[in-house]
Image: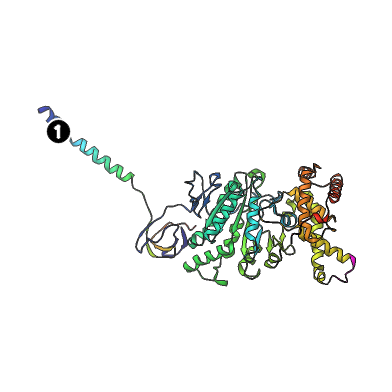
Amino acid sequence: MAFNLQEDSVGVIILGEYTGIEEGDEVRSTGRIAEVPVGRALVGRVVNALGQPIDGKGPIQTETFRPMERIAPGVVARQNVDTALQTGIKAIDAMIPIGRGQRELIIGDRQTGKTAVAIDTIINQKDSGVICIYVAIGQRQGQVAQIVATLERHGAMGHTIVVAASASEPAPLQYLAPYSGTSMGEEIMETGGDALIVYDDLSKHAWAYRQVSLLMRRPPGREAYPGDVFYLHSRLLERSARLNEERGGGSLTSLPIIETQANDVSAYIPTNVISITDGQIFLESDLFYAGVRPALNVGISVSRVGGSAQIRAMRQVAGSLRLELAQFRSLAAFAQMASDLDPATKRQIDRGMRLTEVLKQPQYQPMPVEEQVALIWVATNGFLDNIPVDRVRSWERQYMDYLRNSGSGILATIKEKRALDDDLTALMRKTADEFARTISVDQLEVTI
Amino acid sequence: MREQEADMAVRATEIRDIIKDQIQSFEAGMTVTNVGNVVEVGDGIASVHGLSDVMAN
């Protein structure tokens, strides 16, 4: 692939075995630009940056090819983000909602659960019809194999394409992998489908691009990255879109991942990608080790367009959740010296601690949106205030079982109406009261 | 014996036709390819001299 065009020579990226190439060898041009196979035949497969299968399941039967690099859809082709992409993670769906066609950055230090958030989101798309593409850039082969095995175990490979350019592959392939994955996603989007693409991660992508650029003798800039690293990521992420009805109404949502060093979000690549995306999910190691998992910092995480994509019922309950958590954070510093606090402050802190507890969620257990709404509603309406903090999660588990089996029809109604009205809230109140009578605190397990 | 000789007789027009045909088909089968030579190679990257008409990806 031609990379640099100079007056008397061409800088070429070698996309295959290059150990046998010697000085003086003859080079011919194909007259075409780099392409990858696309289409539904790739779903369920693991491929490399060139779209060649690496999972040992035989050749991929597809006649459709697309150029790796393509200019993003224009303004006329697009439409507002108005449909939610449910991640199945309570804290994200309630407070940092992601819409189809949005770009939401997942950022945090190593070992904070960035990949876990993305994998949970992929698993949750099992019944939503969204095709997922997971692009692994510069990861260990073992890690990629583990992710594929996890997806298989949770029945998520049936709607997923994995594009892997692991650490052992040459930098040019690591640089190309996200573009190939995006082409595969664009094919789904332009045939009217919904696709989700995860880039794990773009920091390593920038390193690979820096390596290629330096070898090509392009002048180094800040942190030795070439002058066009911003364009490297902006042209990639701009290809995510929600197309309008005339163009089939498809969408391509992206979840780029950035790994920070020692929580420094003001480094070069993180600031670039933060400014390109429509919001970010901050994960923090302090929270992770304090047992808050997912380790989401809800104070500085935002979603700039997803709010309009939330279902109404969620918007109704999430408003008070966000407010109460914000108040809790401003008071949390006082929580240490709980002795002389006025009752209002104490109540606020107690509520905040229970809400934080409710937003914790184990890995690989996505929750449907109607259950999230029902749970957040009871939590923000004070039904948890008398439950000890360390028993909240056990209470939650039993209450959700109760809702699913009690036959009150609450979950079905939320799912159908997508909004809370007076009748429904009255029913929810009645059901929560009934449940409170059937259960005593001693029956709940301590989970911390 | 006589008949066989008459069959084997070389006809000038036939030879001319064959040669003409070959010249024509030779010209039709010609294609243009861009060819260059590797000047430098390493780290998955090569620099190539003499390739014209290349489009940067």
Three-letter amino acid code of the residue under disc 1 = Ala
Residue A43 on the magenta span: no
Which chain is home to disc 1?
A: B
Q: Which residues are magenta?
A: A338-343
* Residue A223 is at least partly visible in this image: yes
> Quadrant location of residue A230?
bottom right
Occupied quadrant, residue B8? top left
What residue is rendered at 53% in x and 59% in y? A142
Q: As drawn, which residue projects farthest toward the left?
A: B1
In this rendering, does residue A69 appear at all? Answer: no
Q: Residue at x 62, y 56 (%)?
A: A238
Label 1 secondary element: loop
Nearer to the camera, B19 or A54: A54
Left or right for A377, reference A53: right
Q: Position of residue A438 (x, y in %)?
A: 84, 49
Depth order, front residue of A105/A405: A405
Q: Which residue is mark 1?
A: B9
Left or right, A9 with reference to A111: left
